[in-house]
Image (cartoon, rainbow, N blue to C red):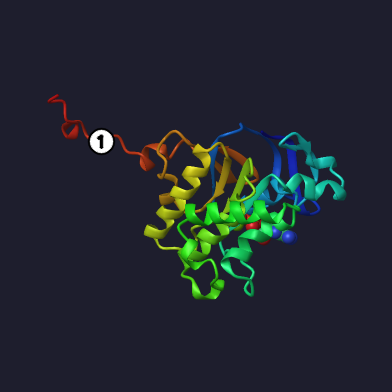
Amino acid sequence: MIRLSQLTKEYQDGLPILFQIDLHIRRGEFVYLTGRSGAGKSTLLKLLFAQEKPTSGELVVGGMELHSMKRAELPYFRRKIGVVYQDFKLLPRRSVYENVAFALEVIGRPPREIKQKVGKILREVNLLHCSEQLPELLSGGEKQRVAIARALVHEPWLLLADEPTGNLDPALAREIMELFDRANKGGTTILLATHDLDLLQYGGRSRRILEVKAGSVCEFKDDHDNLFPTPPLESIDDTE
Ligand SMILES: Nc1ncnc2c1ncn2[C@@H]1O[C@H](COP(=O)(O)OP(=O)(O)O)[C@@H](O)[C@H]1O
Ligand SMILES: [Mg+2]
């Protein structure tokens, strides 16, 4: 559960990027966050990951009040969250396996559990065969699959993805979206920021699309009909 109440974020005094936002995201939702470059999508995700602090207002994520959270509580808070970035952010000198295992090492999981969980998730993203490789030898799509495996291996309840397909061509983007889909079906709440309107069509109408615009966050309803056009009547097959 995510709840923002009257949340304002300024980087510079008097210049709010987000202004008095009220927003509620339920557990298990898959929500897209769209808006033009510079609108504040990444800022919103950083607030949710407690990388940035709200200037004013309240922000509750997974039952924790981030607006008043102490630094010492941060690692505990982040334990149940996964993050995926456009530029992958893999550790260049560690193997694929080590990159994913790292997410469990930092939260102190025992070696046997790490081995089992990393093996399982690498199989799921279809990368078991490159476990021992360094990231630089992988393609963009493969790198992002490693990053997703790392973000999911600790079974987070919330996954934050910031332009995760921004460096990938449409076919690879689709592959990545399928992985998010699977995680969401498994119960992970997903918040995915993208300025790519084509990506919003993935998953159909059922998903909420929010737009960050001029400091506010609103439902992206107006363009729904353009994104999901109603088929012309003559193309509907009613012979059955
Ligand atoms: N650390 C920062 N310090 C000052 N300004 C920032 C900082 N991060 C982002 N901004 C500004 O906040 C605005 C929103 O940025 P961002 O959240 O990255 O937008 P988006 O992800 O939608 O492209 C931009 O004008 C950006 O320049
Ligand atoms: Mg951004």
Which of the 4 quarters of the picture holds residue 210? Answer: top right
Viewer can see residue 40: no
Residue 36 placement, left or right of 173: right
Residue 51 placement, left or right of 100: right
Q: Is residue 50 above or below residue 133?
A: above
List the residue tagged with mark 1.
231
Q: Nearer the viewer, residue 225 or 136?
A: 136
Label 1 within 8 A of ligand 1 by Cβ: no
Kind of element beneath mark 1 = loop
Residue drawn 39% across and 58% down? Answer: 170
Q: Which amino acid, by three-letter code, is at mark 1?
A: Pro
Mark 1 nearby-residue class (10 Å; few <14, some 14–19, many ≥20): few
Which of the 4 quarters of the picture holds residue 29? Answer: top right
User: Residue 67 at x, y = what percent?
Assistant: 81, 41
Q: The C terminus lies in which quarter of the figure? A: top left
Residue drawn 53% across and 66% down? Answer: 131
Q: Nearer the viewer, residue 224 or 144?
A: 144
